[in-house]
Image (cartoon, rainbow, N blue to C red):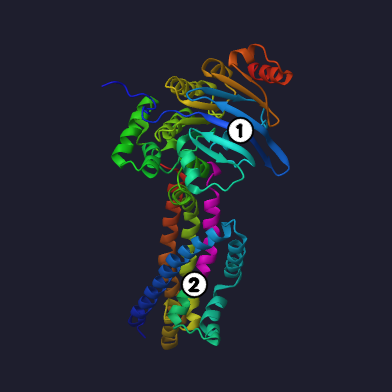
Amino acid sequence: MSVPSLTMSTEVPTAGVEISNISKSFGNHLVLDDISMAVTPGSVTALIGPSGSGKSTLLRCVNLLEKPDRGTITVGSQTIEAGSRVSDRDLLALRRQVGMVFQSFNLFPHFTVLRNIAFPQERILGRSREEAEERAMVLLDRVGLREKAGQHPGRCSGGQQQRIAIARALALDPRAMLFDEPTSALDPEVGVEVIAVMRELAETGMTMIVVTHEMQFAREVGDHLVVMADGHIIEEGIPAAVMADPREERTRRFLSAVLDR
Amino acid sequence: MDLSLYLPRLGDGLVLSLQLTAISVVLGYALGLVFALGVSSTNKLVRFPTLVVVEIGRGIPALVVLYIVYYGFPAIGILFENVLAAAIGLTFTAAAYSSEMIRAGLQSVPKGQLEAAAALGLHGRTAFGRVIFPQGIRSAIPGLMGLAIQSFQGTSLAYSISVNELMSQSYQVSTITFDYLAVYAITGLMYVAIAVPATWLSMGVEKRLARGYA
């Protein structure tokens, strides 16, 4: 038998993500100002910028954890118009296509690792318990944590928890994956494990949008780099090119600050 | 006079006290959950009325609640038999107090849990029932156990509306035997015999919960 791929989603092709003219305010503060961005299917986009630049908010708009005030979000063939009332069905349909990994992992502490990955499959995809747990074990194997299946997340290190969170999202056969600073809560040596899993995932052709400060990952794995500041995209392009020769002064300052760390 | 003749009566009283406790805790905590959800609602038309009901329940002494239900309600045509009136009054008080503990417990669940459930595409009710509620109620358990012990002691108030619970039985026995000190000492010990082991149990559970999920 061949080794199963990390996604095993031959029947679920990855999708592109298109963000068009998205604006979002929190009170009087304009966090996203008319942002547009296209992510081609199977590509990896790294989203960088100083804190408060709106990059996490933008990412959270893609699966409507934040509701944009204006603009449209398209994932695959599904388009959601901001401002209009989004039905529960459309909302869940969108979220089922998009997996998300959080900075703080957000595993369910009262479930075992195996249940964390199997339970959403049963509820959302209607898989049987056996089927869901089998799939969970395959994914745990791929992230190197098969032996953690029966334990609770609290018994796992941060890096392990984040790999489990990635497996949980992948178990639902998403067509695109969002990562919100997936290594920021981790010690660098542990972050490496997570980066390795993400690198492997990128190689399988998953569409990925990654908010990150990991410049090496952005350069080596990213197909596209987007630099944000104050709710605007100030610069974008091929990661190595932007990093080597930023056009904007603010990009230069941000890059040197991150690279000097 | 041989006090042991009257011990069965005290025993009957204790059984009724325990039954009243069970009813007011089970129904009261269920109603407390409803109140907790109402107070947490984003809908003002739900939140404010619920908040008023909860604050009334917490503000009025349980004895006054019993009097209102038993002596007051007949004036508006609602008549309850005394045990039922006691059960209703004690349930209401338990509901009001427990709702705040449950609300605090649910609120202590990190926001990221709900976000993760939403991002996975789980329905709101599944997210609440399987993710938020089990974690929130867990942190409320020590307080709810303590409240159950207080509710048990609080059943003695039902004496005032002639419910034949433990306190009422011991009062009647004491008026027969005139052995007030012995009767009330025994009565006190009977409350202690339930409350103290229950407290130990509650402390054990609290310690177990503090160890986290495993």
Q: In the image, are marks 2 and 1 on the same chain? A: no
Residue at label 1? A20
For the magenta stretch, what is the residue range?
B90-112
Image point (47%, 55%), residue name: B141
Q: Which residue is mark 2?
A: B90
Q: Position of residue B204 (x, y in %)?
A: 42, 52
**Local crowd at mark 1 within 10 Å, few (<14), some, or many (≥20)?**
some
Q: CA distance from mark 2 to mark 1?
A: 58 Å
Direction top: furthest residue: A244
Q: Is disc 2 surrounded by few (<14), some (14 to 19) or many (20+) residues within 10 Å?
A: many
- Dividing the picture into quadrants, the one containing residue A253 is top right
Left or right: B38, with A244 as reference point: left
Q: Quadrant of the N terminus of chain B?
A: bottom left
- In depth, the one of A108 and B159 nearer the eye is A108
Residue A126, by quadrant, is: top left
For the residue marked with disc 1, what is the amino acid? Ser
